[in-house]
Image (tube, helix red, strand yellow):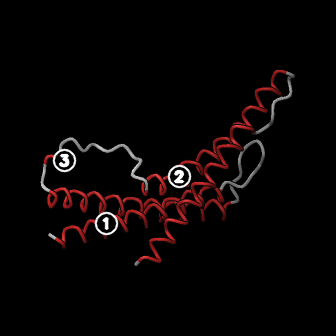
Amino acid sequence: MVLPRRFILFLTQTFNWIAAGAVVVMMLLTSSDVVLRLFRHPLPGAYEIVGLLGAIIISFSLAYTSVEKGHIAVEFLVQRFSRGVQACFSVFNDLFSTALFAVIAWQTFAYAGDLKRTGEVSLTVQAPVYPFVYGVAIGSGLLCVVLMLDLLTSLHEIGKK
């Protein structure tokens, strides 16, 4: 159980670094576009590339944020319950979230396949859109795996009680 958890943590960190790199590219692209607009030579397609990078940034950073428990959580009510009840809430939350992101990953993967088959491209730079949608599916799938590990941890917590 230790090896898969370590591997998943490695994957989440790797995806987070890719997201960080995409933030840097987005920042450089946006800054360049703004400066070049001053000279009346904007970068064509900068807006659409920033949008595509945004999808990668968000989806690739979700799993790492979940591992680090960086999401906003409303715990003021749940904290008042016993550890066992808190674990039950956690199981429900992890189960629901895992199912939700499994469906999101599955449907996004199917949508990317449709985009690939139809040859959908962005309007200005004519870049294929499907690789970015596959990226969203992969990021959602990795989050699903992280949530599943959290679910197993919560179930183990309940089993100890």
Badge 3: residue crowd in 10 Å (few <14, some 14–19, many ≥20) = few
Q: In this view, does 103 lie to the left or right of 161?
A: right
Element on which disc 1 rests: helix
- Residue 161 versus residue 133: which sits nearer the camera? 161
- The residue wearing badge 1 is 151
Name the residue located 63 percent from the left edge and 42 percent from the top edge: 51
Q: Is residue 75 left or right of residue 10?
A: left
Q: Are marks 1 and 3 in contact (CB under 8 Å)?
A: no
For residue 69, above or below residue 46: below
Who is closer to the viewer here, 91 or 40?
91
Compared across the picture, whether 152 is left or right of 134 comes to left
- At 44% from the left and 71% from the top, the residue drawn is 5
Q: Nearer the viewer, mark 2 or mark 3?
A: 3
| Residue 48 pos. (x, y %) | 69, 41
Check disc 2 and report the residue beneath it: 61
Labelled disc at residue 79 = 3
Q: Is residue 10 above or below residue 127?
A: below
Q: Distance between the residues labelled 1 and 3?
A: 18 Å
N-terminal label among 2 and 1: 2
Circles 2 and 1, Cβ within 8 Å, touching? The answer is: no
Mark 2, secondary structure of its residue: helix
Q: Neighbour class for label 2 at 10 Å: few (<14), some, many (≥20)? A: many
Q: Which kind of residue does numbered mark 2 sit on?
A: Ser
